[in-house]
Amino acid sequence: MLHFFHHPLSPYSRKIFFLLEEAGHPYDLRTVSLEKKEQKDSSYLVLNPAGRVPAIKDGDFALSESNAILRYLTRKYQLHQFYPTAVEEQAQVDMWWDFCSNHINRPLIDLAWNKIMAPRYGGKPDAAVIAKAEKNLERDLPVLEKQLQGRNYLVTADLSLADINLMPFAIYAKDVIRLDDFPAFKAWINRVEERQAWKNVVSYSGH
């Protein structure tokens, strides 16, 4: 049995949750309470030495880091519909996966933290972080917008790991940027939101 250790509000955990729900692969879901600092327990550090979520345990094999887990699951369980085996097509998935990880996901989570979460939990927004994130998105969101024009998904005809990697961060865009300026990106978010697997992720976390 595949054991999946996660926190429901972690976007990195949500990537794994999303893939498993899309694939319909059986798994045992185990919540790691970040509030209780369970990620620092010695028993969990065996699975993820960095003391973060997510992690998986597949038989005797343990793995952490969300992107490594995504690649492992698609290869181990032959989920080629999400990660094509053709070299050129897989490289395109990797390219947009990396582009979004490096240039879209981080700024969106920085904006979400400083504009939404910090005020909610009594923290102080960091104006410098907000300004840097907005500047980076102003530069890089048009690249993503162009890629999505005339497409339902980022690379392949249906959902791929590139989309699965982006969605847990993109969901914050509605609250932190003027999404109407990026109609293809907005349509993509709306399209992915309608997938039952993503609805399951949201339903479980309550957000």
Image (cartoon, grey):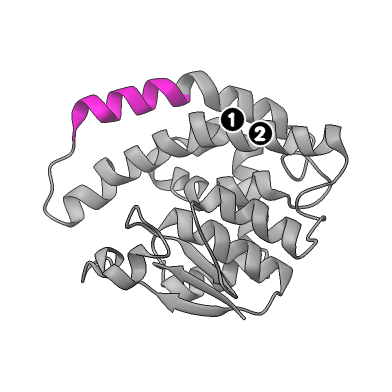
User: From this viewpoint, which residue is outermost toward the front?
Assistant: 60
Position of residue 68 relative to residue 77, above or below, is above
* Label placed on residue 139: none
Q: Residue at x 62, y 54 (%)?
A: 70
Identify residue for label 1.
99
Quadrant of the snapshot with the N terminus = bottom right
- At label 1, the amino acid type is Phe
Q: Write down the quadrant of residue 113 in the picture.
A: top left
The range drawn in magenta is 126-137
Q: Residue at x 76, y 49 (%)?
A: 83
Quadrant of the snapshot with the C terminus = bottom left
* Location of residue 130 in the rendering, given as x and y in whole percent from the top left corner: 28, 30
Q: Main secondary structure of the magenta part?
A: helix
Q: Is residue 128 magenta?
A: yes
With 156 as the anchor, is 207 left or right in this view? left
Report if the CB atoms under discs 1 and 2 are less than 8 Å apart: yes
Position of residue 103 relative to residue 20, above or below, is above
Q: Write down the quadrant of residue 112 in the picture.
A: top left
- At label 2, the amino acid type is Trp
Q: Residue at x 82, y 56 (%)?
A: 81
Identify residue for label 2.
96
Distance, label 1 to label 2, CA atoms, is: 5 Å
With 195 as the anchor, is 131 left or right in this view? left
> SS at mark 2?
helix
